[in-house]
């Protein structure tokens, strides 16, 4: 069962548009603001509800864009205003998580922070809490800790973490040192990783003392570190915050936390991992979404959409609809159909990762209004 962790602060980065889920996910309605599992609430709300038992409602911060502030606060009416950290524009995950670390460290020097994406799906809460509790114990010992997921298939959609030797930390019996990170592999390589218990999926969860995280950013990205500290120094002064963000944020280095923190820390033996024995998915494309909503039955056609009007015969895959149109699907396997008022996507699960290419093409052709 979950227990409050007194020195712990949960951070929810809520950014990105989820381009592989276009046209469902848009710049003004990114995937964390959608109900993608049929739970009746958004992924962001699901994330909050999952974290509240271990952090408490006053110790959860959300990092999001100014354009999404109203939607975030509508979804999370209990969040304190001081815990909504607004970016003027996207600068990637190192900036978002680093900003939260700098602000919270200034407020509470010994705080342990945990970063958990707003748009992931996790099932098996008790196992999740057990993993986080172990990761916090490792973080207290001065390591940066991530939670890796034991692969359930040879996936090419996720990056991987390779474990090295065990790490002895009281309260973290499954802790191990991370040897290295691996980018998304091809299928043959993914099969070798799947057969090797040393490899875990990189779920993008990071738990660390805020000061340790900031030290690592300072070592690998000194200009980013300097900008984050300057922002944090002004943050809790309402008169100074806005001008500081407008002046400093556009100059902040745009880099993922994997490159700015995790990989350099792994090279120094400063990065640890806890296996997460729970169901996890980053809902990275429509193939993932179909699996989440088909309840494990390959011959199902998953349907998402309020008052969806779908006729199906001998078909499988997923249909997502935001219109009142009747959609008939006959005799097709692994189909992906996404129907919105101004855009229609038709593909297959096999090609779901290629949707990002459509988004890039729309940007390049000047038709960004549908993004």
Image (spheres, rainbow, N blue to C red):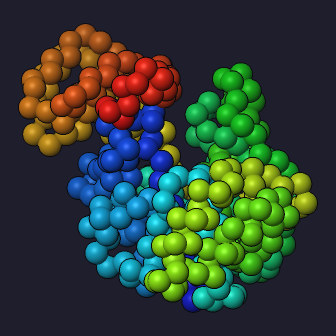
Q: Position of residue 122 (x, y in %)?
A: 46, 56
**Which quadrant of the figure has residue 206?**
bottom right
Question: How many numbered dots are placed on residues in this image?
Answer: 0
Vertical comparison of 307 with 88: above or below: above
Image point (36%, 58%), residue name: 68
Q: Is residue 199 above or below residue 80?
A: above
Q: Is residue 261 above or below residue 195?
A: below
Horizontal side of 190 relative to 305 (left or right) equals right
Q: Is residue 363 above or below residue 77?
A: above
> x, y (%) of residue 232?
62, 78
Left or right? Give the position of 211 relative to 293: right
How far across and how far down the image is residue 255, in percent?
68, 50
On-image quarter of the C terminus: top left
Residue sitting at x 62%, y 30%: 156
User: Which residue is outermost to the top?
Assistant: 331
Is 273 placed left or right of 368 in the picture? right
Along the viewing direction, whichever of 339 and 359 lies nearer the viewer: 359
Please say whether residue 174 is visible from this viewpoint.
no
Look at 65% across and 58% down and name the residue there: 252
Residue located 65% across and 57% down the image: 251
Find residue 117 and report its horizontal and vertical position in percent: 51, 57
Based on the displayed image, in which of its 4 quarters is residue 133 positioned? bottom right
């Amino acid at each position: 069962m979950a227990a409050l962790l007194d020195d712990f602060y949960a951070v929810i980065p809520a950014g990105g548009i989820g381009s592989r889920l276009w046209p469902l996910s848009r710049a003004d309605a990114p995937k964390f603001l959608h109900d993608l599992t049929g739970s009746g609430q958004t992924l962001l709300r699901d994330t909050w509800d999952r974290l509240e038992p271990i952090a408490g409602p006053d110790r959860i911060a959300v990092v999001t864009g100014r354009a999404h502030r109203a939607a975030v606060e509508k979804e999370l009416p209990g969040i304190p205003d001081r815990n909504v950290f607004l970016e003027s524009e996207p600068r990637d995950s190192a900036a978002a998580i680093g900003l939260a670390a700098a602000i919270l460290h200034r407020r509470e020097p010994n705080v342990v922070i945990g970063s958990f994406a707003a748009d992931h799906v996790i099932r098996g809460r008790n196992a999740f809490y057990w993993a986080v509790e172990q990761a916090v114990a490792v973080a207290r010992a001065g390591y940066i800790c991530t939670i890796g997921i034991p692969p359930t298939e040879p996936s090419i959609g996720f990056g991987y973490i390779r474990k090295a030797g065990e790490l002895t930390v009281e309260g973290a019996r499954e802790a191990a040192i991370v040897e290295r990170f691996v980018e998304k592999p091809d299928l043959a390589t993914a099969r070798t990783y799947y057969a090797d218990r040393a490899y875990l999926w990189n779920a993008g969860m990071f738990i660390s003392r805020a000061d340790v995280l900031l030290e690592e950013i300072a070592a690998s990205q000194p200009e980013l570190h300097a900008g984050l500290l300057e922002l944090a120094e002004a943050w809790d002064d309402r008169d100074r915050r806005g001008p500081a963000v407008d002046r400093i944020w556009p100059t902040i280095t745009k880099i993922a936390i994997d490159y700015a923190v995790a990989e350099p820390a792994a090279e120094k033996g400063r990065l640890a991992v806890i296996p997460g024995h729970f169901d996890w998915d980053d809902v990275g494309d429509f193939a993932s979404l179909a699996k989440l909503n088909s309840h494990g039955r390959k011959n199902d056609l998953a349907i998402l959409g309020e008052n969806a009007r779908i006729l199906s015969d001998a078909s499988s895959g997923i249909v997502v609809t935001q219109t009142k149109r009747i959609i008939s699907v006959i005799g097709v396997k692994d189909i992906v159909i996404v129907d919105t008022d101004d855009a229609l996507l038709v593909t297959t699960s096999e090609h779901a990762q290629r949707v990002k290419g459509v988004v890039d093409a729309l940007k390049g052709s000047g038709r960004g209004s549908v993004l």
